[in-house]
Image (cartoon, grey):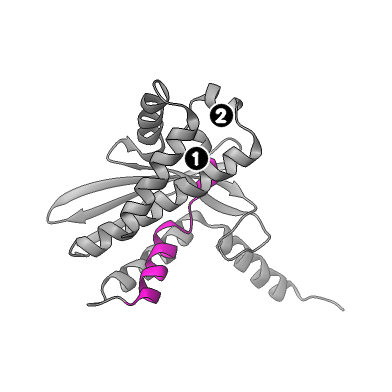
Amino acid sequence: MKISPLLLAIACSFAFAAQDPVALLKKNDTELQIALKKKSHTPKDIENIKRLSSGLFDFAKMAERSLPKKTLEGLDSSQKATFAKEFQRMIENSSVNKFKNTTFSASDSTVYEEPKYKKDSAEVWVSIHSWSKGKDMLMVYKMDKSSALPGGKDSDGWRVWDLVIDDLSTTKNYQDQFKSILETKPFSELIKIIKDKADEYEK
């Protein structure tokens, strides 16, 4: 069966759009803001907010990058998996907890800059300016290619491994905290601390 050039062009355009990191972030942000604007939230709504606020993050990579290199090299696959699981729970539950206890106010305007590709286009940084009451908040999403897309799709896609807000790196912030803890406590205690935090935010 022959495929017309027009159909091929359309198929290619859809494939390109699916890989566009800016379009991906815009779509996710639009859906999240719609979810947050609801006057009340059911348990299903909360799960949706959790999915939208963290679904684009590669928590396994973030977890690994938040640990000192020496600590990471001494862990087996099971320890890494447990740490990544509790790390993800802590961040997701913390995000939902903030949404529950903060009055949502939509930004006055949002501007997405052109993506900056790095490492032969294997990594991309997307800068977003969000204005609220005349104040500009700069967010930089650092993303790279991953085979683990939200929804379980088996194709390459962009996933976030760090979010920098006004020059404060999320991953670096956790790295500093965990390094300080590990100077006096074993790795098993760090996991317990993270698990306890995740449980606390879940209440």
Instruction: Pick the residue in front: 106 or 72.
Output: 72
Q: For mark 2, what is the residue?
A: 72
Residue that protrudes farthest toward the right in the picture: 1
Instruction: Pick the residue in front: 78 or 175.
Output: 78
Q: Which disc is residue 63 wearing?
A: 1
For residue 91: magenta?
no
Q: Which disc is residue 115 wearing?
A: none
Residue 153 % position (x, y):
64, 64
Residue 17 % position (x, y):
56, 63
- Residue at the (45%, 56%) spot, across then down: 22
For residue 43: magenta?
yes
- Residue at the (72%, 70%) spot, across then down: 8
Amino acid type, label 2: Leu
Q: Earlier in the sequence, mark 2 or mark 1?
A: 1
Residue 193 % position (x, y):
38, 39
10 Å neighbourhood of mark 2: few (<14), some, or many (≥20)? some
Amino acid type, label 1: Ala
**Mark 2 and mark 1: Cα distance apart in space:** 10 Å
Which quarter of the figure has residue 201?
bottom left
Q: Which residues are magenta?
A: 42-62
Viewed as shown, does residue 134 lie left or right of 123? left
Q: Quadrant of the C terminus?
A: bottom left
